[in-house]
Image (cartoon, rainbow, N blue to C red):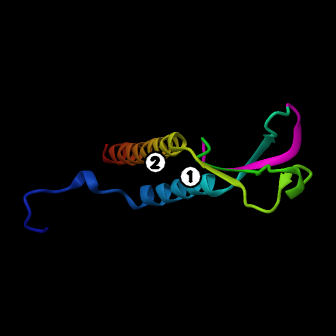
Amino acid sequence: MKNSKFKMKWLQVHLSTAVVLMFAAGWIIWGNVTPWFKDFMVPGDNRSKGWLSRNFGWPHAAYQENPRFGPIENCRFGLDLSQGPVIEWSYAGIAIDLAVAAAILFAVWFVCERWIAWRAGRKKK
């Protein structure tokens, strides 16, 4: 690359920007893998029974686990404990989460690089 005519300056990132991007990416990953809970309403019943559905994904739920309800003889308090939860994937939620993550990382990169360039310009004067 030393004798190359093309210098890929647009791919270079300052070390401090890379560290800040790493922390931002870690925050985004933490937000997407930490479950958050919301009330799950029993189908046909307008009252909450206190059962919660587990959701993963930030800012939109991309993966959701809902309690399974079955016949009364196989259930305890109407909740079917013989089978696992009902799992639902939301492709729209995945797309929203990816778009938000990309926008946050781009904004962090842009702000950090502009701030570094501004400080470098101030020092030259």
Mark pair 1, 2: CA separation? 9 Å
Instruction: Tell me if I can see residue 22 in this picture.
Output: yes
Relative depth, front residue between 55 and 9? 55
* Residue 72 % position (x, y): 88, 50
* Residue 80 % position (x, y): 82, 55
Inspect the magenta stretch and tell me whether residue 2 lies in it. no
Residue 105: mark in rendering: 2
Residue at the outermost top position:
46
The residue positioned 92% from the left and 51% from the top of the image is 77
The residue positioned 56% from the left and 56% from the top of the image is 29
Q: Magenta part of the protein: which range?
A: 46-59
Q: Is residue 28 left or right of residue 105?
A: right
Residue 119: mark in rendering: none
Inspect the magenta stretch and tell me whether residue 48 lies in it. yes
> Label 1 is placed on what type of residue?
Ile
Label 2: which secondary element: helix
Relative depth, front residue between 101 and 79? 79
Q: Is residue 103 left or right of residue 46?
A: left
